[in-house]
Amino acid sequence: MKKLGTPLLAPVGALVLTLIISTLALIAFGSNPWDAYSDMLGHAAKLNTQVDILNRAVPLYLSGIAAAIGFRMNLFNIGVEGQYLLSALVAAQVGGLVSLPQVLHITVIFLVAMGVGALWAGFAGFLNVTRGINEVISTIMLNFIAVSGFMAWGVQAWQADTDGQALNANNLGTATIDESGILPDITPLVEPFVGDIRDNNPLTGMLIVAILVGIGYYVLLNRTRFGFDLRSTGLNPFAARAGGASPKRMIVTAMALSGMVAGLVGLVEVFEVEKFRPNQIQGLGFAGIGVALLGRNHPIGVAFAALLFAFLDISSGILQSTQTASREIVVIIQGIVLLASVVAYEVARRVQLREEAKATAEALAGGVAA
């Protein structure tokens, strides 16, 4: 029972601490915590809301896995934001220019997105191993170049032909991708089990892609020699080199893999709106860092963290609608979740170390007495 309680200490403690601090924050801002929580949970109980949560969780999960790959290598890829936006822009532009059979068309869009993400992140790894530039610095700079440079230029240079019509929210962005290049939603697959889902709220087909990415991430890092080399290089590059791994090659490879997954993040919206728009959802890359940290870089943990963040994001709308609380309180709660998790896991780690030290001392004392 004691062994079972120690692993549960951190998540349970984080949940309790989150509820306490969030309640205090709601009270401090003049909101009724009970009403706010009731509105959030009541809204989440609706089927359509659950579909919205899943659709929002998918890009958050992909972003979290992208960040987690870097973390397992002891690299801080803070450039997921720029990587997914630039990848989505280029992939949407290429997808809008070509006309191919459906399977080939969708494959081309995926390959372009992953390739652009891998190149953009791999460049940061290249700078690290050749010039000693910390990946945090290089990825921050590359974020700026991608968003304020290439994306701003690409949106203007690749603006779709409006046939003389004035620019508006409907025709802004790259050319519309043909239907053959749009990944089908999986609504028909789930409706027999959950009931009717309204036509304008389909369940994104990228959910299947996210599940495959999570499985691939786990197998690659935990069941292959490459994954062992990656993890060992992150822990101790000198020992990894003695074991035959090349730390420099692993750094570049890990960053490229992280960017490859990051390239998939923006495709969720690209397939939904069939183009890249200037107001493409931003912030998913930075949110993914929090998702990875909260999920402890484990694919299942990242999934729960992505669902939690998605639930909070979707809940912000109902809070504003009912005026129970300000929608900005959701951002505060997300920060509280991360803070509480860090504190709870650190407390659990110290408790575990103390128990291990106590067990070791008792074993040594028993050996001496014998």
Image: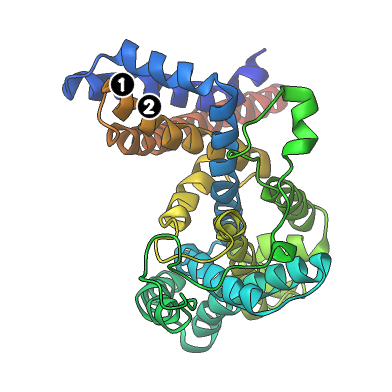
Q: Position of residue 245 (x, y in %)?
A: 73, 74
What kind of residue is marked 2? Ile
To which residue does mark 1 refer?
322
Q: Depth check: give the residue in front, 52 or 149.
A: 52
Above-or-below relation of 368 to 182: above
Q: Secondary structure at mark 2?
A: helix
Q: Label 1, label 2: how many angstroms apart (C-alpha)?
A: 6 Å
Please report contact status of discs 1 and 2: CB closer than 8 Å, yes or no.
yes
**Residue 167, percent across and down?**
37, 69
Give the camera-side residue of 362 and 159: 159
Q: Is residue 247 above or below residue 301?
A: below
Residue found at x 74% / y 47% = 208
Q: Percent from the top left, x then y, of residue 13? A: 46, 22
Residue 105 lies in quadrant: bottom right
Q: Is residue 160 above or below residue 280?
A: below
Give, as a three-letter code, the residue at label 1: Thr
The residue under the point 38% across, 25% down is 18
Q: Secondary structure at mark 1?
A: helix
What crowding class fits label 2: few (fewer than 14 Cα within 10 Å), some (14-19), or many (20 or more)? many
Q: Quadrant of the C terminus?
A: top right
Q: Nearer the viewer, residue 236 or 219?
A: 219
Q: Residue furthest front?
A: 164
Question: What label does residue 318 carry, if any?
Answer: 2
Q: Residues within 10 Å of mark 1 (few under 14, many from 20)?
A: few
